Image (cartoon, rainbow, N blue to C red):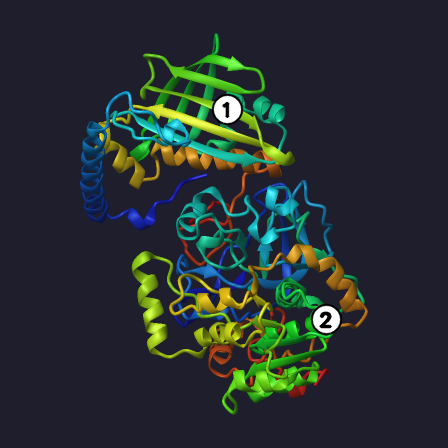
Amino acid sequence: MSRRTKPLSDPLLLAAAGAGIAALATGAALWQRRRQARAPDDAPIATDAPHWTLGKPSARALFGKSVLVNRPRAELYAAWTPERFPEFMENVVAVEDLGGDVSRWTIKGPAGRDVTLVNRISEREENASINWQSMPASDIANSGEVRFVDAPAGRGTYVSLILAYDPPAGKAGRLAAKLLQREPEVQARRDLHRFKQLMETGEVTSNASPSARPSEAATEPHF
Amino acid sequence: MRAVTWQGRHKISVETVPDPEIVNPRDAILRVTSTAICGSDLHLYDGYIPGMRAGDIVGHEFMGEVVETGASSTLKRGQRVVVPFTISCGQCFFCEKQQFSACDNANPAETRDASELLMGHAMGAAFGYAHLTGGYAGGQAEYVRVPYSDVGPVVIPDDLADDDVLFLSDILPTGWQAAVNADIEPGDTVAVWGCGPVGLFTIQSALLLGAGRVIAIDHFPTRLALARKYGAEILDYTQVDVREALDEMTGGIGPDACIDCVGMESHGFTADNILDQVKVKMLSASERIHALRQAILACRKGGRLSIPGVYGGFADKFPLGQLMEKGLTVKSGQTHVQRYTGELLDMVRDGKFDMVSLISHHAPLEDAADMYRHWHDEQNLYTKIVLKPGLKKGAIEGRQEMAHA
């Protein structure tokens, strides 16, 4: 499956949009830092929000997302294995098992470059959670957790993903990647939803269909 | 294959495009035998639906013959099926609650983001209706790919003609759900704004669900005549003050249930566009916005308001206080087509509905561009258009040539 980014293909437009967003993001980050500087370190957190949605002063990008999947917890836990990742992780080309819970991932990165991740599963709780941590050989330092919790009233399972990573080439690179829809956060959010589709319906949803646009094939998704 | 494509505002063309192919195991491919133009296709035609791209194949009311099936499809080659306009997986939380139009899987991961931003949660998916609702090719074509073909399509017995069952795809279940959502009690007076195809099926449905009387409101003589034929009393809003007439017809209390089958031309969804579109509409004094407001003011205290009409964004001057103080119950939403098709097919077989007399034209697929123009400009003469891919260009049948006339 190939990803198309036609509307943003003009490099000038991309640069202008990137600069605008970068200015906004910088402003927001400064405001956030100033706001947090005023709060004493030991102030209690007056919120029940998940911790990954709270202020993020570090440069490390942090992402969290939960999705309701209408299947039993054990089935979802069993399906979350590196061998099956290419089925629902759209930009994962291959996952190679290096033994000892270490695997090497080849993923499609921004601007057509392949990126290699080397990740080790650091902790596993049967039918409940999987944690991982990247190894020094990884192109992108990353760590994360996927957690499976029973949803109430027989609705299936809440699957929660937390992902932290050092964006390649810093904040600017992250923005550029986001505009090209190759940013890990965008990918993770969509991959999580593809996991839900695969588990609930047995297939990853595709809108692949013909159009009168000569550049598109009837067998490839488009948007 | 040949297909009806959207090329821009008021630009429809029939083009040669690639044939659809099986992509997923639950898919099926149909050879389309009949496909109708819907009132909501006019929102696309008028350019009010964001997320359309030049070259998109349109059409969400269609039926045909199964010509190819994926490994997990339950359909068989050669079966005739009608396809619900809503694409629904049948297995998510929403589909299990029979809220099929809210399906959480049919809108692909790539197209969900925009609609989630605009609506709060990602919308479901539909055929031939912009990329906010999935970007699937529509059925105004010779062939169409149908995802989740084991859940949606309704297999049609041979003794029923295309015209008898085609509207199971959208406007019959939409009219039925509109009446169901009005929580009709025996003997109720039900007022229906708009006598387009959905309004006409709402009238029939309300009477079948026990309404004592139905009062229909429109201004096109042909559409009002159809409403009367289906058993409604009629009001031409160009001739009367609708609220005064409704009060006088109900001893001063107003109708028990009011159903808005008008909707408003969907406004732009992008932040800058929404306000502009609403302002444009308000300045043009469109009676379409007027209909919902009038329905709220006309409804009896403690009555019910059902809104099958399509709305897209924010509305101006919405009578919220009147809604609250009168204690109205409101139900709305896109149609959960798959919930109703089984019982409605049985009712069609039992002859409960007049399925055909609203059809004003049969036309070849090749004449689609002209038909869209007529559908948009001549709503008195054109009350429902059915496109037939099998007909030769120019072979248009009007009401007088058709057997049911």
Check the image and report above or below for B61 versus A102: below
As drawn, the residue found furthest toward the bottom would be: B239
Residue drawn at (39%, 61%) of the image: B54
Identify the chain of the residue marked 1, using the numbered disc in the image.
A
B310 vs B43, nearest the viewer: B310
Type of residue at label 1?
Arg
Residue A147: mark in rendering: 1
> In x, y percent, where is residue A76?
58, 27
Residue drawn at (38%, 58%) of the image: B269
| Residue B226 in view of the camera | no
Identify the chain of the residue marked 2, using the numbered disc in the image.
B
For disc 2, the neighbor class at 10 Å (few under 14, some 14 to 19, many from 20) is some
B321 vs B307, nearest the viewer: B321
> In x, y percent, where is residue B293?
47, 73
Give the secondary structure at mark 1: strand
Decide if residue B144 is on the left or right side of residue B121: right
| Residue B400 in view of the camera | yes
Decide if residue A129 is on the left or right side of residue B389: left
Q: Which residue is mark 2?
A: B164
Type of residue at label 2?
Asp
